[in-house]
Image (tube, helix red, strand yellow):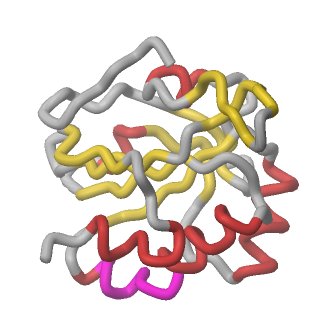
Amino acid sequence: MAVTLKAGDKAPQFSGKDQNGKTISLADFAGKKLVLYFYPKDDTPGCTKEACNLRDNYELLHKQGYQVLGVSVDDETSHKQFIQKYNLPFPLLTDTDHSTVNAYGVWGERNLYGNKFMGIARTTFVIDEKGIIREIIKKVKTEDHTAQILPS
């Protein structure tokens, strides 16, 4: 995790395929607020809770002007199954080449139950209409993530 972004930085450009093979890039969200959330793996307990919380609050986020985009290193097939299983209303970007996770500094050594491995650190970037990072949420509450994103 060499890249250390902070609030106020320009969001790094990214481009990749979504669950349907459609190319999505940061430029697609110009003039819009974006919730860019990085998660470790499709259809795992924490990632499912986080995705479903964003799904259940999607209309609220949308009314506040936010677009939502999830990113993991899973492939299109995995993303498509995850979206269909949980009826997710937002796209999931596949980052199998790790270009986006590296650009945002969320890929690195993880430790789970004493096992060290390389993976994604669950992190959300709230990006404004001008492409500036307004907030970085590193301690994600998977079951109540929307409350961390929306201004109170």
Q: Is residue 31 left or right of residue 95?
A: left
What percent of the width, then of the height, locates residue 103? 46, 22
What percent of the width, then of the height, locates residue 16? 60, 36
Q: Residue at x 23, y 30 (%)?
A: 6
Quadrant housing residue 88: bottom right
Depicted 93 relative to depicted 90: above or below: above
Q: Residue at x 66, y 64 (%)?
A: 46
Q: Residue at x 84, y 67 (%)?
A: 81
Q: Residue furthest front?
A: 114
Quadrant for the C terminus in the image:
bottom left
Name the dominant secondary structure of the magenta segment: helix
Residue 19 part of the magenta segment:
no
Nearest the camera: 24 or 139? 139
Which residues make up the magenta segment? Answer: 55-62
Depicted 115 relative to depicted 50: above or below: above
Residue 56 part of the magenta segment:
yes
Quadrant housing residue 140: bottom left
What percent of the width, then of the height, locates residue 62? 32, 78
Q: Is residue 110 left or right of residue 125?
A: right
